[in-house]
Image (cartoon, helix red, strand yellow):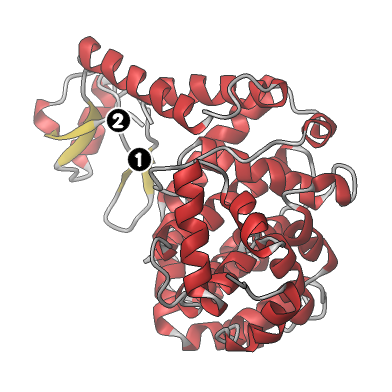
Amino acid sequence: MSPGSLVPIADVKPGAELAEALRDAGGALLRPAGYVLAEADLENLQRRGIQAVTIVTPRDPAEDSRLREAARARVLHIFRHSAEAPEAQALLHAVLAFRQEHFR
Amino acid sequence: MTHPSLAEMIARLHKLPAMPAVAMELLSSLADDKTEIDALARRIAQDQAIAARVLRVANSPFYGLQTQVGSIRDAIVVLGFSSVRSLVLTATVVSGLPAGRCPGFSQEHFWRHGLAVGVAARALARALGRKSDNLFIAGLLHDIGRLAMVVVAPDDYARVIATAREQDCPLQQAEMSAFGFDHAAVGAALAQRWNFPADIREALAFHHAPTDGTPGGPAALIHYADAIARALDLDGAEDSLLPHLDPASIDALDLDQHTLAQVLAETQEGFDHCSLLLG
């Protein structure tokens, strides 16, 4: 999941991506997570009384690379007895791809 | 040093806390289509701590409900009885089956892993077009025999944990060396005693030896779900180790890389939300 920061709606620029789903006070979904806000959305949300939204913050490439390497090292630690086993290869590759993409 | 035999271990299972009554009713409803949902909903709602935890998950973004649900009845109407049953069972067994004192054993890691395997089994079942209800429960409870061993023989089990750590081997292997049987055998005995449905019994008994169960059946599925949960690191344990995988059982599931990637994503997301049940 992308990291997000809470930003007052007046400061949000068109093109910003929601880091989490946006709901009104009653819990009804207004926009899903990952939605890219256009100018018209920002006006619409302000009219609905939304004060702030959580948007995806840009990432630092060096930090990303460190996190990817940490995820890879952790997966290889869990697979330390089976990294060469043919029956574990499909899971190993899928988990490496997933965890390195999501930094988990 | 003599350890209890399997027969002695089973004879001592009465030391285990009783499975909470609501959990027993929910488990028997897995095998009984005539369950009175209405009466069961009222029984669940009486335990406010459990009901509150279940509603917290039901109202999480994972389920994407348009409106918040405020009662167990509403949750059943919107999510369906089987989803709510899985949530209630999880919340009930996690808080109702304490492990007592066994050095090195973490009850928190134990239940996080159980829940993770349940969620992974549900994701695998969906990907394979199978019914997922019992498989979620089978995943949740797949290591219940280990909890029983910890309660019945805490000192012996503490040595098993220490040995597994020293030799960097799976706990199951250290159980076999110390006791001559493993948690799957104890789990199978418990499942019999608690009258679990046949597919859950099979999963508990053979999740480390899936070739002894139905080919491609519940044991094979829990076998792989166990590995997926470990690989995703969902239990929070530092010394996690991928369990030994049985090649024929993995092949029989016939998952392509794309489907496996979807299963991983669904497992991670499902776990993130369901872990609210753990307290």
- Mark number displayed over residue A67: none
Residue B274 is at least partly visible in this image:
no
Real-space Cα separation, disc 1 to disc 2, in angstroms: 7 Å
Say which element carries label 1: loop
Q: Quadrant of the C terminus of chain B?
A: bottom left
Image height of A92 relative to B125, above or below: above
Quadrant of the image occupied by residue B126: top right
The residue depicted at 52 percent of the width and 66 percent of the height is: B157
Chain hosting mark 2: A
User: Residue at 78% of width from left, 45% of height from top?
Assistant: B220
> Which amino acid type is shown beneath numbered disc 2?
Leu
User: Which residue is drawn at the image coordinates 59% and 53% (left, top)?
Assistant: B174
Residue B60 in view (yes/no): yes
Residue B72, how many percent across, how many down? 51, 75
- Residue B262, image x, y percentages: 60, 30
Label 2 secondary element:
loop
From the top left corner, tell me how far across and down residue B33 is, in percent.
Answer: 82, 74
Between B175 and A13, the residue placed more toward the observer is: B175
Q: Are marks 1 and 2 in contact (CB under 8 Å)?
A: yes
Viewer-closest of A33 and B197? B197
Q: Is residue B122 above or below residue A12?
A: below
Residue B262 appears left or right of B98:
right
Q: Position of residue B6 (x, y in %)?
A: 73, 73
Is the N terminus of chain B in the top left, top right, bottom left or bottom right quadrant? bottom right
Above or below residue A68? Residue B264 is below
Q: Quadrant of residue B28?
A: bottom right
For label 1, the crowd category at 10 Å Cα-Cα, with few meaning under 14, some 14 to 19 and many 20 or more, is some
Q: Which residue is mark 1?
A: A21
The residue that mark 2 highlights is A18
Going by the picture, which residue comes out furthest to the right?
Answer: B214
